[in-house]
Image: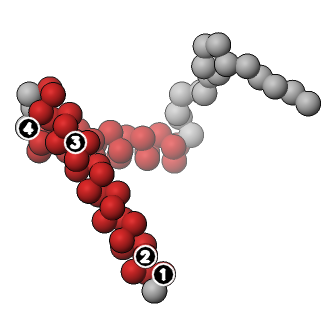
Amino acid sequence: MEEEEDNTSANSEIRFITLELMKLAQQSGRSFEDMAQEYLENGEKLHAMLQKGTGLPLKAKRGSVSREK
């Protein structure tokens, strides 16, 4: 039953990503295939960066407040 829920969740995420890529492709005048390829390449780059620990340091957003207790 849990595997079925995982599949449903994954399918939902794929549909969402597909719709977003379709919107971006239409807005930019590029093909869906180009947008999807770029998305996958960026995901692979991010994955590699996270594994190597070479990601950019996180900075506080401008105007954010640090609240200490």
In this view, 10 is above or below 49: below
Residue at screen point 22% across, 47% down: 19
> Around disc 4, counting alpha carbons within 10 Å, would you say few (fewer than 14), some (14 to 19), or many (20 or more)?
some
Callout 4: SS: loop
* Residue 46, x across and y down, in percent: 42, 41
Residue tagged 1: 2
Colour scheme:
secondary structure
In this view, 2 is above or below 62: below
Which amino acid, mark 1?
Glu
Closer to the camera in the image, 13 or 42: 13
* Residue 45, x across and y down, in percent: 37, 40
Callout 1: SS: helix
Q: Are marks 1 and 2 in contact (CB under 8 Å)?
A: yes
* Residue 25, x across and y down, in percent: 15, 35
Q: Which of pointers 4 and 3 lies earlier in the amino acid sequence?
A: 3
**Could you tell whether 61 is left or right of 27 in the image?**
right
In this view, 29 is above or below 45: above
Residue tagged 4: 31
Q: Are marks 2 and 4 in contact (CB under 8 Å)?
A: no
Label 1, label 3: how many angstroms apart (C-alpha)? 29 Å
Q: Which of pointers 1 and 4 lies earlier in the amino acid sequence?
A: 1
Callout 3: SS: helix
Residue at screen point 87% across, 27% down: 68
In this view, 67 is above or below 24: above
Foreground label between 1 and 4: 1
Q: Residue furthest bottom?
A: 1
Numbered circle sitting on residue 22: none
Q: Which of pointers 2 and 3 lies earlier in the amino acid sequence?
A: 2
